[in-house]
Amino acid sequence: MIEVKNITKKFGNKKILKGLSFTAKKGEITCLIGINGAGKTTALNAIMNLTPLTSGEILIDGKKLTKESYQTIAFIPDTIAMLSQMTIRQAMHFMKDFYTTWNQERANELLNFFQLTETQKIATLSKGNTAKINLMLGLALDVDYLLMDEPFSGIDIFSREQITSVFTSHLIEDRGVLITTHEISDIEHLIDKVILIDDGIVVKDFNAEDMREQEEKSILDVMREVYVK
Amino acid sequence: MKNYLKLVSFELSRFIKIYIALIVVTTVSQFAGVFSQSRNYAATVNQTLQQESFSLNDYFVSYPPLTFINVTVSGWFIIPIIFSAAALVFYSFFIWYRDWFGKNAFIYRLLMLPTNRINLFFSKLTAILLMVLGLVATQLILIPLESALFNQLLPDYLRYNLSTQTIISSSEYLSVLFPDSFIQFLIYYGLGSLVLIVLFTIILFERSFHLKGIVFGGLFGAGTFILMLSPFIIQTKLSPYYLYPIENFAIELFLGIVISIFSIWVSHYLLNKKITV
């Protein structure tokens, strides 16, 4: 389980996170929702130790993040974390070189599914295909937790559909997924847990299924209640 | 260790095209310099002999014969060396900033590698040092080859034959690149490495604290500079030759090692606790 405990983060005089706390369990898709500037990306960066916290604590399966943790948790940022001059094959070699959890079979499976070829250069890919490669580089790691920052941001509907279908496949099964997105409609039916954040704190968190069954409200309905006042 | 070596190889591969271009430019320019200098010299001698009705013996009473040292002070020879050095100085900054800026933020990947983050520091440092030594070694190979071409282009009576060692020790620039003694080599290249280590720490201060980081980095750089000069500053107050040269060397060596270790420790701390993507 990923445990984010009362984390705060200041950029200069501006407080971005003001005591954010939530958990994301293995085997569940947890969605972090908030308007721009709410602190979603900062929270993911903090989990991966890509930005220092002012205070608070983050635990992965009860332990603080170490270099070994990067073999059990992967982050897919909203921009591809690979050199654009590389071909897809070179990018995969790079991952294979450094990660013992790299699963080449799964990478090939994803490449086939996305209908991309190894010889293509990352720089020449469309935005949608770049997002798919970014996703492939994260998903092909045999990790317990996957963090995804806006995986649908600015990409065409067909690419979004392909990426969404990944969420229902065995590629995600049994893993803990923590995702931030604006395109909630694409994955609403897949989300297990929702965490609504605003101005650096959690304003509401709930189980999406329970909300649908008990209160007959969609995630969008709850978002309207919380954000549209 | 394995990841460090992989990162070094990766860093070298990222600069290899520009690096080869630098070697090619240096080689072509210096050989062109040998060719042009020797041809111009032969033409000048012929012209002077014809115009002044000198004999060759008379000519060499008034003018010295050409040596390879004359070639080494020409722009053809020096400019590519300065250009290569400037390129490596520029790349010492770029090797970090290229990972943050540009179309893709590769720094995400580097910082998330399952290895000690200080390996990023050491791999970039090693890559720059290897590139410097590689260029120096290339120059060392080029000098005897260029000297051989020089000897081929000019007849015996128009030139002095010089050994590679004499050529190097007679040139202001080359004697810095190839010091006379191993101790001097350690001093020059050790100081270069120290400057690079401190520079990397300053860059990491900036990458961690941005505007404030420039101030912190500036103070850190100034502090290390003053500390390195402190034995000499103190001696100017006491007496200019208060310490023997060997004592000065020992103190500077000690300070250099202490500053390097401290700078690496600060970089390790910044990379693990303060760096931000």
Image (spheres, coloured by chain):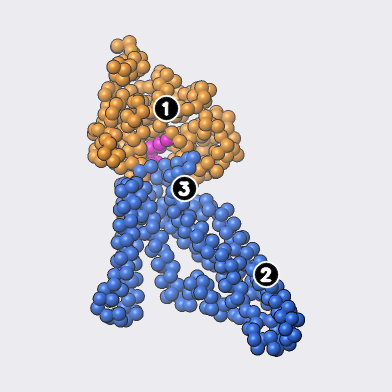
Chain colours: A orange, B blue
Give me the C-alpha separation between circle 2 and circle 1. Answer: 71 Å
Query: Is any part of residue B206 visible from this angle?
Result: yes
| Relative to A101, residue A186 above or below | above
Task: Identify the residue position indicated by label 3 in the image.
Answer: B98
Work out which quarter of the rendered image holds the N terminus of chain A and state it: top left
Structural crowding at the residue carrying mark 1, measured as other residues with C-alpha within 10 Å and reported as few (<14), some (14–19) or many (≥20): some
Structural distance between the alpha carbons of marks 3 and 1: 36 Å
Residue B152 visible to an observer of this rendering:
no
In the rendered image, which residue does mark 1 sit on? A173
B177 vs A218: above or below: below
Report helix, strand or loop for mark 1: loop
Task: Tell me if A158 is positioned left or right of A192 in this view.
Answer: right
Percent coordinates x, y for residue A100 in the rendering: 44, 43
- Residue sitting at 57 percent across and 72 percent down? B73
> Magenta span covers which residues?
A68-77
Q: Please name the amino acid that badge 2 sits on.
A: Ser
Q: Which residue is mark 2?
A: B36
Asked if A121 appears above or below B158 in the picture, the reply is: above
Give the amino acid at mark 3. Arg
Q: Position of residue B201 (x, y in %)?
A: 36, 55
Disc 2 crowd rating (10 Å Cα; few below 14, some 14-19, many 20+) is some
Of badges 2 and 1, the one in the foreground is 2
> Which quadrant of the figure has residue B252?
bottom left
Q: Are marks 2 and 1 in contact (CB under 8 Å)?
A: no
Disc 2 versus disc 3: nearer the observer: 2
Foreground residue among B259 and B199: B199
Q: Disc 2 is attached to a residue of which chain?
A: B
Badge 3 and badge 1 in a common chain: no
Quarter of image, res A190: top left
